[in-house]
Amino acid sequence: MRIFALNCGSSSLKSVLIDTDSHRPLLAMHIDNLGSVDCRLQIGEERFSLDAGTDAPAGVRRLIRELQARRQGDEAAQAVAHRIVHGGATFVRPVRLDEPTLHRIGELNHLAPLHNPVALAVAQLAREEMPGVPHVAVFDTAFHATLPPRAREYALPLDVAQRLGIRRYGFHGTSHAQIARNVAAFLEADTQSLRIISCHLGNGASVAAIEYGRSVETSMGMTPLEGLVMGTRSGDIDPGVLLHLLDHGGYTAESLGKLLNSEAGLKGLAGTHDVRVLEQRAAEGNEDCRLALTVYAHRVRKYIGAYAAVMGGVDAIAFTGGIGQNSPLMRHRILQRLDFLGARLDEDRNRDARVDAQVTVFDISDLNSRTRLLVANANEELEIALQAAMVLQAAAGGPAVRIPIEISVRHAHLTQATIEKLFGTGYQLQPRTDLSQPGQYAAAESVTLIGPRGRIGNVRLMAPPRDADQVEISRSDEFILGVDAPVRISGDLRNTPGITLEGPAGRATIPSGVICARRHIHMNPDDARRLGVRDHESVQVRIDSGGRDLVFSDVSVRVADEFELRLHLDTDEANAAGVQPGDTCELVRSADPS
């Protein structure tokens, strides 16, 4: 499919016509310095000056006309994909654009006042200029829909936060999602096995902690103002400073917003947000520029250390964005004093690092570095186009697919060695009930779980035996047993607590392996294509249970040839939802999950 991806920033417009089957760019165009006297359009090697003050809608009109003149007939765009910065709590997947959807997105403008209004104006104009093709919105915030409550919520009264929609959303999601996949491919690993710290460093900047394929922390919050020092944004700041400026600095809410968004950050510290200029002036002895660079690097380094702690370690640290990709000096500054993480930089490779559409990831790690240090090419337009293509392909697949629901009660998958400790030497589990996934069955045997606080009996064993011990319990079971089990996908057992099991022949204490199973959907590759989803993607599902229309978020997709299509919920979730045997669900595709 040929998709025209539009990436509208606060001062630039990037657009690429992409063949999403081959990932090949067919026509790349971008406009820099929107709204200034030096507004320029570049198409390949061609460069054009645009009228002074050209704004985003006028720029998009020019891009579309260039597209239509240069790519016609069988080479024309078949769809348009738009990057929208803020999707709020509602838009957690890409969605086709229509008037009601545009209106709902517009209701979020106050959350990203520099970006959303411009992107909406661009989307509306593009729909008018290209009415014969579908338009899809892809949201920066969607990747961070998996943030756990402890990372998502601010410490404010709950009624205030809920009434005003105050929570952390995160941004640069298309970039962080792509970096996670590209890093995993470079390391020849599955995203599900990696802890990645993704550093998107440009005029806007954010860091994300991506634990086993899911965003679990990110530096930007309710708006893009939180977090790192940026080109013109302050990043983290004591709220008391803002109150002081309002009370004693002569600022209004409007002028304070302008200060924090447009006059702070690197520009506020040193008069410019161009890191190349800052590095040159710092080398010449300018103390303000030296301070700006050290403050910037210090903030990024602080977040890297914090996110390594959040994830219990880190396997790879990746840099992308205009600064992350192109400033060896800034990478050097940031990576200082991270030896305790096993992160050691190769200075020669750091200076030589170059990434592009062909070389998407470059390793700058020292040979003795336990943590891989990487530079990754930012290609948000490709990610935007691929996400849009999945939505359109799924929509073309026919009516909604009903997904059977299975309720997973507490159970254990054990190694043969542990089984023999509990039931005797050479013991073999006896089949009781076949499971929906081929080759698996519930065994006739059960065990007792013994935790620091209590015990639970009659815990069914699953078979055949596995290579590692795993016990799956519910949140209610956690409190009974007195253990703190993380929410994980089956098989993801790093940094998990252990427990004691008791059987007829004795006891066995496993040092790790206790989890609360994350809600997930098993499917085969054909199902994934029909539903327009990818392995490890997080989705929403709607369950019509007893006349109630319930939506579950953060449902993980697992794709394998042998899987049968099933949604798996634990007993707590099923009971809360009133799910009965035989109930089904469907993926939420609409912008409005209700």
Image (spheres, rainbow, N blue to C red):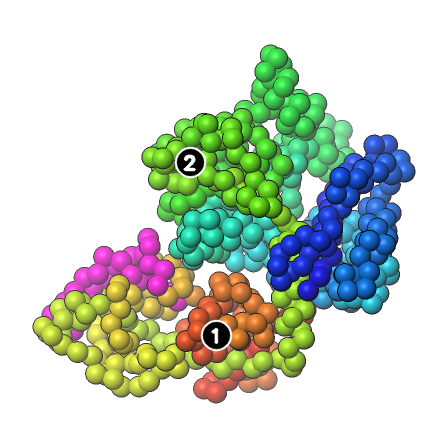
Q: Pinpoint residue 591: horizontal percent, then vertical percent.
A: 68, 67
Query: Residue at the location (26% across, 75% down)?
Result: 464
Q: Label 1: which residue?
A: 524
Residue sticking out furthest to the right: 51
Q: Pinpoint residue 521: horizontal percent, then vertical percent.
A: 48, 72
In which quadrant of the rendered image does the N terminus lie?
Answer: bottom right
Q: Residues within 10 Å of mark 1 (few under 14, many from 20)?
A: some
Q: Secondary structure at mark 1?
A: loop
Query: Residue at the location (25% across, 65% down)?
Result: 467
Q: Which residues are magenta?
A: 491-517
Residue 236 versus residue 285: which sits nearer the camera? 285
Q: Secondary structure at mark 2?
A: loop
Residue 113 versus residue 491: which sits nearer the camera? 491
Q: Is residue 60 left or right of residue 157?
A: right
Q: Residues within 10 Å of mark 2 (few under 14, many from 20)?
A: many
Q: Label 2: which residue?
A: 365
Which callout, 2 or 1, points at the residue further toward the start of the chain?
Answer: 2
Location of residue 540 with respect to 298 vertically, above or below:
below
Magenta stretch contains residue 494: yes
Residue 481 visible, this orientation: no
Magenta stretch contains residue 545: no
Query: Residue at the location (13% across, 76% down)?
Result: 427
